[in-house]
Image (tube, coloured by chain):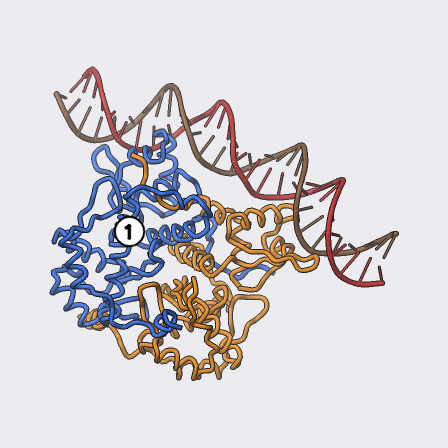
Chain colours: A blue, B orange, C red, D brown
Amino acid sequence: MTVTHAPNIAPVAALIGDPARAAMLMALMGGRALTMSELGAVAGLGKATASAHLRQLLQGGLITTRSAGRHKYVTLAGPRVAALIEALMGAAADLSPAPPRIRTGPRDPAMRMARLCYDHLAGARGVQIFDHLTGAGHLAHTGDGLSLTVTGTAFLTRLGVALPDPRPRHTPLCRACLDWSERTSHLAGPVARALLLALEGKRWLIRTPGTRALTVTPAGAAALDRIFPASPLRSPLDDAARNP
Amino acid sequence: MTVTHAPNIAPVAALIGDPARAAMLMALMGGRALTMSELGAVAGLGKATASAHLRQLLQGGLITTRSAGRHKYVTLAGPRVAALIEALMGAAADLSPAPPRIRTGPRDPAMRMARLCYDHLAGARGVQIFDHLTGAGHLAHTGDGLSLTVTGTAFLTRLGVALPDPRPRHTPLCRACLDWSERTSHLAGPVARALLLALEGKRWLIRTPGTRALTVTPAGAAALDRIFPASPLRSPLDDAARNP
DNA sequence: GTCATGGTTCGATGATGAACGAACCATAGC
DNA sequence: GCTATGGTTCGTTCATCATCGAACCATGAC
């Protein structure tokens, strides 16, 4: 019996399956556009090889490129690709047996706390925000994804977030992105991007050039805990689990 | 600069990147355990080759095997692997340009309507249920994933769902799984599995041997629409988008 | 104009790994 | 005991593809 028609996952997976290409994609998860030579450097390749890899990623639709002068800037093709990479990171973290047990310096906790996921906030802080928004009814599941409710729109506007134009779009304004370190969803999409920009503008989060990790300033930590407190709604099953 | 420590996604992706292995994994998405020869057949391989591929998948942690007599039964390693495959299907459906445009017979719509995703319900009906549960406050985001609320527990129990023991577990009872055809979340995890069994028990959904597609009986369609109506909560942004 | 630099293209080389046939092992049925 | 069948292991063959050096093109600086 032939298998019923379904998307061809093998080519995409194979594209990510090469260590060099995977390293490049991971580097692009920082959200910044990188030049071809920079990407070749992170993968430890010569120019020729890097160019070949990037051409494949481009043909596969995983990245986009923009030429500026004699430089060529590369970015991930979009949030959906970023979500896929995060999903893979989650699976890989589960499956690979021992290696992640090595202590990896003080930067790793920072990554778990707050980091860039392409163009939005991920990590414990990202999840905290997502949980608060849903718990407070600012975010609702609708037919085609997530959207802000009236109160959510007001809430974020009051916070100083420059919300994108809600006019009809092909891509939803809000999406859920699976957080690989926290194993839950955080907010993604244009709204999440705007939110991140606002938080950076207030100097609550600071981007560091070298890493995807974001540093949470003391003022930021206090503000986030005040503005996005843990949702009062807690599952009774969880409580039952604590005192059985 | 060396990349900050992060999970190694390349090996996992490479494992799925081979067409033969991808075909096997897709076949396993039906949730049933398949024998080695069956898997070899769906991929069109000889015994020797199939065996080699399965050994790799096993070492990679993507599948589990159980020996019964002279047969060896293969299943996906768990829900998290299934979620990864679904994520890949979603991305692949986006990226591959033309191919999915071919009309693919009457079974494809059925797949989009209701299908198995490893051990739970996916497709439009799965999303419908998920949306209703969240909209009605039966499902809440908590620190570590999703959980049933008090009303949710009562709701499902009243429906005849044999809910699993809520005692502390390493894996959450509810998870969100990204639906590749609907592009939104549907419910996954032990609770979703129990729910599917209940719906099958009522003969609202019927499993067909050859496919992952589930047939929704007329009685089932009526019952599902009555019990899991579309959430009354609809995003104001969506409304604004309709009459700008 | 010249020069340096970012990027692409072209072959050639080399290694990885997918595929198969054949021999082998183990279980089930007789 | 014998035989059929499901799976594994072993060598071999063959393609694919990552990698590199070198030549080449284009842009920017001078």
Looking at the picture, tell me which residue is in the foreground, A67 or B74: B74
Residue A15 relative to residue A168: left or right: right
Q: Which image quarter is the C terminus of chain A in? A: bottom left
Q: Position of residue A228 (x, y in %)?
A: 20, 64
Please state which of residues B90 and B60 is positioned toward the viewer in this rendering.
Answer: B60
Residue B18 position in % (x across, y down): 51, 47
Give the secondary structure at mark 1. strand
Q: Quadrant of the N terminus of chain A?
A: bottom right
Residue drawn 42% across the image and 73% down it: B125
Look at the image and tell me whether residue B97 can be seen: no
Q: Is residue A124 visible?
A: yes
Amino acid type, callout 1 = Cys
Direction from residue B145 to residue B14 in the image, left or right = right
Residue under the image location 28 percent in, 51 percent down: A117
Q: Which residue is mark 1?
A: A117
Q: Callout 1: residue from which chain?
A: A
